[in-house]
Amino acid sequence: MAKIALLIGVSEYEPGLTPLPAATKDVEAMQQVLENPDIGGFDEVKVLVNPPRQEMEEAIEMLFDDRQKDDLLLLFFSGHGIKDEEGNLYFATHNTRKNLLQSTTVSAKVVHQVMKNSRSKREVVILDCCFSGAFAEGWLVRDDGFVDIKNQLGGEGRAVLTSSTSTQYSFEEEGADTSIYTRYIVEGLETGAADKDEDGWISVDELHEYATKAVQEATPAMKPEIYAIKEGYKINLAKAPIDDPKLKYHLEVDNWVKRGNGKIPLAGRIILDDLQTQLKLVSEDAAAIETLVLEPIQVYKRKLQQYEQVLLNEIEHDFPLSDEARANLKRVQQALGLRDEDIALIEAPIIAKQSLIESKGVVDPLPGLIKVKYFIGILSLGIISFAVAWYIKPDKECPPCKLPPIKITNQFAQVHNVPKGKFNYGGSTSWSFMYPKLESEIKKTHPQFEINIIKDLVQGSGIGIEKLIDGELDFALSSRDVSSEEKDEAGKKRFSLKAIPVVKSGVAVAVNPKLEINSLTKDQVSEIFSGKIDNWRQAGAPADIPIKLYIRSRNSASTHEFRKTLNIVSFGQNINYVDTTNEGLREITKEPGGIFVGPISNIVPQCGVKTLPIINKGKTFYPYQQQNFVSPAECGPGKRNPVNIEAIDSDEYPFPVRFYVVVKENGQKEQQAGEAYANLLQTEQGKNMIRQLQETGGLDKNK
């Protein structure tokens, strides 16, 4: 077994591409950790700095050529990436000319082909590359063009790590020795801190997790990605020290900084001082480790300060802010890698204060036009932004302020105002794997709260809400919000309905397990269910297989949300409606070209189907936990695919669904019961139970 690496850094280019000084420094830093026998222990590390196209392409081919199955091959590239009009990715070389991409760059497709031809089953690619040039003075920003990196560089036994998604920016800070992403890749290897399970080895997924955390602390808009198939996640890249005092201290500091929201709390300070003494660390070493751990957070704070200074400067010269000033601020925001929610916290109080100053002596300190133009335009979505806007506009009504807040506590026992009596509920079938366990545990803590699921009325969200309005249920479970028609029906009976969101979930796509399709893009799913794609060959399958669509009934909430998310006006003619999720799953196991969509927790743990990852805007969303993937052939009781909770918790998940508790607002005990049930589910105890149930879909609950 050999460990061989090729490190390519391109910092100097022909006119038309901005120099990237840190690229060659990235290569030097990677070389040091990979060649170190106590860290990377690579047998051979070849370095290419500013190579022309032919030299670079030949070196890549030689890296993967004539290798053995167990050889570990690592390709690292830092430099510019360029995409063509079709979204194909090219790696820029020293002699790249944008008008001659084919002959002056190395295509990702070429790299993919040589990797595919290699006998090695352990191939790792790390890309710290950009897609355009300079974006703002003082920073070098990498363009946001969509490039399907997984399809161009993915494969069995491979792992591809990228500095960001292909719809976001990667950054190189002027004056820094290395780029942001490479800096933390090297740091995770060099310190050993990436070894999260402390087994003495740093695997690909551990390195990705470490670098991602640090990058997003420093530059929140960057989202490093990892694309791996099966074994790719667990390829061991480097060694980490075991029982090393510095590493132990590093991990403990990291733990306390996480608990302290970016700083070391008093309790952490006391414990760390004691640990320093136990480990016999000198003060200088302990301080250096703390500085290292806190550095990404300090970088983030400096960026906020930079943005604030630019904002104040723009306001000084131009207030109210002009469109040009706004455009300048947006460019600075992107250059600093800040999200809208980051800058909202800076902008809101500053602009509010400036508006009040400007309007001194005016009866209405904030005329309506100013309110609309600046507060709606500036404040981002969410509770914080709404609260600030409401504070500035006290003369306006705040409808959400009428709603009783959901009380976040730790345990069921800490929830107050839980009524005494018998209360019936029912509704969405998507809740069916959760409500029995939740009901049982709630009754143990609050025996006076005699909630009772009416199983005959667990027929769908619409049925549940209808029976709530009619008085047959005291509160309802739903996997969609209340419709305007349902609100009107409630209004006729002189009460209103309130849908309290309590759980994030999603829809998953399942196909026949023998179908040779490993993923779909969100657009492909839309075209399949609208009938534009009716044969699997059109979606990339090698065989000519007609597609047969299965979906829950037209009135299903998950069907409604799925259709709304994809903007599907009408389903294709080959659609087949089923009454239950189990029926849909049975049908696709019998139909070679079958495809079904339904609640993620009801699909992913099932053994007889294949659940597909979905690609959206260059990012792959795995509905199952990829590192614990179980193939249909291996699946069985006690060994199933757990749902990827992190994916559905993400606001970027392609097919999101929300679970709601629907409450009748009538001031009576029914309202109190529904609100109490929602409050119970929002405790840490409730959230943990729901998470466990979501992962398994309620299957193998005794395992």
Image (cartoon, grey):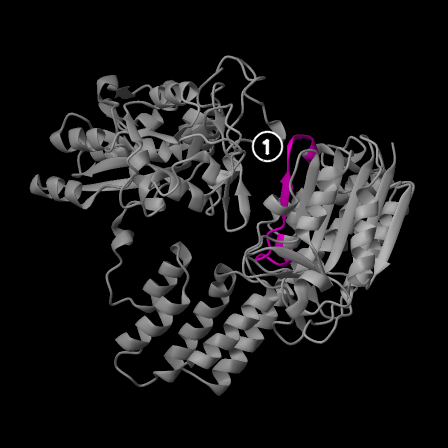
Measured along the vertical axis of the image, is residue 574 above or below residue 579? below
Identify residue for label 1.
Answer: 626
- Quarter of image, res 124: top right
Residue nearest the viewer, comparing 624 with 297? 624
Q: Residue at x 67, y 64 (%)?
A: 101
How far across and how far down the image is residue 677, in percent? Answer: 32, 31
Residue 52 visible: yes
Does the magenta run of residues contain 219?
yes
Q: Helix, strand, or loop for circle 1?
A: helix
Question: Which amino acid type is marked by label 1?
Answer: Gln
Image quarter of the N terminus: top right
Left or right of 328? Residue 562 is left
Quarter of the view holding residue 529:
top left
Magenta span contains residue 514: no
The x, y position of residue 420, in whole percent, is 25, 24
- Position of residue 103 relative to residue 242, above or below, is below
Identify the magenta region.
Answer: 216-232
Q: How far from the left and from the top, in percent, is residue 402? A: 25, 51
Q: Nearer the viewer, residue 68 or 412?
A: 68
**695 to 109, vertically: above or below:** above
**Residue 279 in which image quadrant:** top right
Above or below, 270 relative to 610: below
